[in-house]
């Protein structure tokens, strides 16, 4: 079954929490992928480990050298490693065509000030 990117994005938008995230990005992105028709088991609790899951359901890695100037497409998903003294689980978020959403609506690609300052390793996936 193909992933319905419109349903994936709609679920992200409809279920974003107000304000800043609550460390539930992996759960929110998994549920959005499932809403889009993907089979994703709930056993991937750590956002930084989402790459293999995305590859298994049909995403592919794309090269993004500068997230500030890159033209992302609706449905792109980013998987980010943790930053020093940050959440050990890293971060995962989906792109709606205008915003990155995980469990909250992000102001940009970087999930917060720690990620923005340190710019840890990340991979972007496209369906």
Image: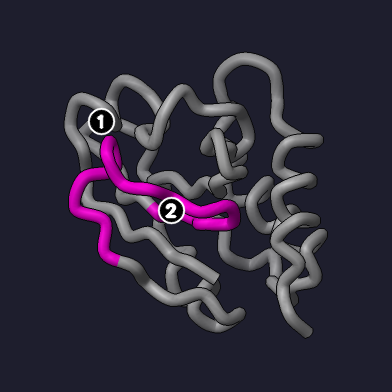
Residue 70 part of the magenta-drawn span? yes
Q: Which residues are magenta?
A: 63-79
Separation of disc 1 and disc 2 at Cα? 20 Å
Left or right, 38 with respect to 99, comes to: right
| Viewer-closest of 63 and 118 | 63
Residue 67 position by quadrant: top left
**Label 1: element kind:** loop
Which residue is painted at 58% across and 52% down in the image? 74
**Label 2: element kind:** strand
Residue position marked by numbered label 1 in the rendering? 85
Front of the two marks 1 and 2: 2
Q: Local crowd at mark 2 within 10 Å, few (<14), some, or many (≥20)?
A: many
**Residue 29: percent from the left, percent from the top?**
64, 51
Residue position marked by numbered label 2 in the rendering? 78
Which residue is painted at 51% across and 57% down in the image? 76
Above or below — where is 29 with respect to 24? below
Left or right, 18 with respect to 49, comes to: right
Which residue is painted at 43% across and 53% down in the image? 78
Magenta portion: prevailing SS class: loop
């Amino acid at each position: 079954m193909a992933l319905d990117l419109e349903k994936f994005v709609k679920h992200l938008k409809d279920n974003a929490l107000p304000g800043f995230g609550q460390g539930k990005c992996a759960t929110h992105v998994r549920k959005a992928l499932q809403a889009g028709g993907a089979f994703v088991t709930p056993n991937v609790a750590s956002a930084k480990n989402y790459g293999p899951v995305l590859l298994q359901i049909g995403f592919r890695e794309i090269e993004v050298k500068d997230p500030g100037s890159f033209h992302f497409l609706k449905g792109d998903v980013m998987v980010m490693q943790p930053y020093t003294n940050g959440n050990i689980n890293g971060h995962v978020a989906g792109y709606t065509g205008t915003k990155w959403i995980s469990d909250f609506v992000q102001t940009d690609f970087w999930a917060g000030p720690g990620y923005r300052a340190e710019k840890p390793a990340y991979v972007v996936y496209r369906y």
